[in-house]
Image (cartoon, rainbow, N blue to C red):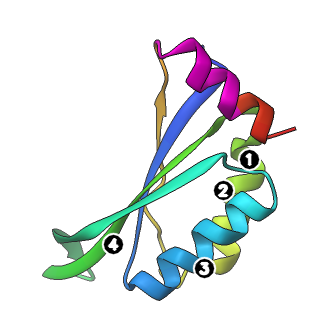
Amino acid sequence: MNSKFCMVLTTCPTKKQAEHLATQLVNLKLAACVQISQPVTSVYHWNEDIVTDSEMQIMIKTMSCRLEQAFKLTLSLHPYDVPQWIVVDNVSGSEPYLNWIESNLK
């Protein structure tokens, strides 16, 4: 990872599960902010079938030094066998906002 700041994309099947995950990540200072979007429709292969599900899309704003712990927590709380975990390196951003992220993860 080239940047010390990153975003992680994941999903949860319900708003309640998404809010629980988000709250735990923020409480444990593994994320400065977690945004939960309105439901999205996901279409994917699972067990030889094509599945269509409604899911809550989640964006986790964190630092690369917190990724491993955030991933372990997500795996422990997540209801899916294979939860989405896509890390997007932050190429640039507002310096005050990035400073805010860093200060909230100390």
Q: Earlier in the sequence, mark 4 or mark 2?
A: 4
Q: Amino acid at mark 4?
A: Met
Position of 67 with respect to 13 (left or right) is: right
Q: Amino acid at mark 1?
A: Glu
Few, some or many residues within 10 Å of mark 3 (<14, 14–19, 20+): few
Q: Which residues are magenta?
A: 92-101
Circle on res. 56: 4
The image quarter in which residue 72 lies: bottom right
Question: Residue 42 in the image: x percent, y percent?
Answer: 18, 69
Q: CA distance from mark 3 to mark 4?
A: 12 Å
Q: Residue at x 49, y 75 (%)?
A: 18
Q: Residue at x 70, y 58 (%)?
A: 26
Position of 44 with respect to 18 (left or right) is: left
Mark 2 or 3: in front is 3
Instruction: Name the residue nearer the viewer: 19 or 73.
Output: 19
Instruction: Name the residue nearer the viewer: 2 or 32.
Output: 32
Q: Which element is circle 4 on?
A: strand
Residue behind mark 2: 71
* 94 drawn magenta: yes
Residue behind mark 3: 20
Q: Earlier in the sequence, mark 3 or mark 1?
A: 3
Residue behind mark 1: 68
Q: Amino acid at mark 3?
A: His
Q: CA distance from mark 1 to mark 2?
A: 5 Å
